[in-house]
Amino acid sequence: MSKFHSTINRRDFMKALGITSASLGAMGMASPVFHDLDEMSQSGIGSKRPWYVKENEPGKLTVDYDWALMKNPDQMKTMHGGGFLGVLEGRNGFCQDPNSTFRQTYGIQRSQEIIDKAVQILHDGAATNRPGYQVRDLALNAGAVTVESLPYYKAAAGDAGRRNNPKWQGTPEEAAKMVWTAGRFYGASDIRTGEITDQEKVLFFTRDLHNVPIVFEDSEIGYSNSTKRVIPNKKYYSISVAIHMSKELFRYGYSPMRYAANLSRYRQWRPIQMALMNFISTLGYDTLGYYELMYGVIPAEASALLFGHSEISRNDNFLISPDWGSVQGYFTLLTTLPLAQSKPIDAGISRFCNTCKKCAESCPQQCISYDNEPSWDIPNSKAVPSAPTSYTTPGKKTFHTDAIACMSQWVGTAMGCGFCMGNCVFNVNSKSMIHQLVKPTVSALPILNHTLRQADVLFGYGLTPEGDFEKWWDMNLPVYGTDSTFNSTMGGYNK
């Protein structure tokens, strides 16, 4: 322990500076002093879960998984991933490339009709000053994200940042606290960590979005060329990063403003990832990052589930956090730095989804299951019944969303869709008293789930009316303020 590490409390610290309680009250602030990152990590700062959130054993989720049925997914075949073909090279638009999975599955002619209609929606909205589609709304969305290349792999060997310093040594628990502290400093909302087991290697993609095979090799560092993207055969740990998005803007369902909230997490992820990669490399360990702004070599939601950020929802395309609700962005950074295991959680959320069905009711394409119980079976799409379900991965007992119908809604609005996430009963400004009472009830007394859903006591409001787009600009709300509230002029949203 360094000589700088002191147990002096805040009151004594302020007395030493000669600041009285009166002047302290006038200042309205008092801050502890940290001399180094170790002291900061041990200061008690941390992400403490509510009392009702239980931790399961590693690998035990609130939905059933059969690792024997699962297989490494092909990112080229995923419905959403294939939509960015062409966009990443700066040409065409989302799902406009005829080789994308959506175009090939839905049909070139039928999908082109959807795309043409979406383009017309944007044009007409700007031309007629439609609320939510005006030029300033489109500008907000355009500034939310920039698609550009990222470092794929960063190795400590030869890194100038280390300057021949010794490799950092410490326990996995110390490393996890240190990464959490650094990640929060760089801008992450929360961080969970854990080991990628041999069993969980089935989560790695087999191809990237450039149709390049992803392979494991006995290589000291990772690299990529036109024929392969190489992952070194090493032991990897996951840094699962959560980034808050605007609950308020997600209540706009679909519009440039909601899409701005959705895309903002990528803009925020870029500097966080860069900072963490440099941080860990300087410690003497390797990192494996995203090869595109939006895509890495392992599904981010898998890490968020395995390491305790959240639980899976009825719509299996998004997760729900007991702390922050349905509007969260998740990212995964892989590293060779040994990190302590964050455990998966059980807050009663997945069980509540069995009863709720509000997201299914709000879905414009009715692509979310109304079944009462989850299933292992992956149903064919109602939009294209003959299409194989290779765009999703077996081995999950969940409610399987119709990904083709969902993608048609995404493409058809030109700005994606967030009806399910915005309408979710957990998308609330959750610091109010009623929500602090209801969420423990959901966790501890699932027998009341149906009653709570019928009473709508969790939510109490639906999507924001389109006319309120204009009001949003006058509210001065933080774009990614998780617990900010609308005032009374917005229809009493400050629940």
Image: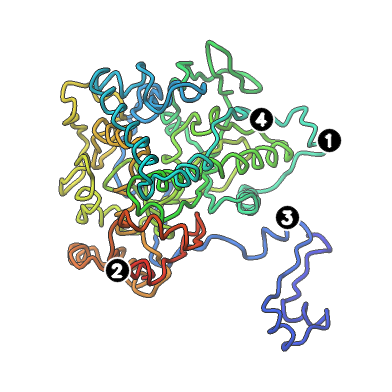
Q: Which residue is mark 3?
A: 37
Secondary structure beneath dot 2 equals helix
- Residue at (64%, 42%) from the top-left corner? 276
Tell me which amino acid carries mark 3. Leu
Residue 12 visible (yes or no): yes
Mark drawn on residue 154: 4
Secondary structure beneath dot 3 equals helix
Mark drawn on residue 441: 2
x%, y% of residue 271?
Answer: 62, 41
x%, y% of residue 469?
Answer: 38, 55
Tell me which amino acid carries mark 4. Lys
Residue 59 visible (yes or no): no
Secondary structure beneath dot 1 equals loop
**Disc 4 and disc 2 in contact, CB within 8 angstroms:** no
Separation of marks 2 and 1 at Cα, in angstroms: 54 Å
Q: Residue at the bottom extreme?
A: 22
Lower position in the chain sequence, tag 3 or tag 4: 3
- Residue at (75%, 63%) from the top-left corner? 34
Q: Which residue is mark 1?
A: 163
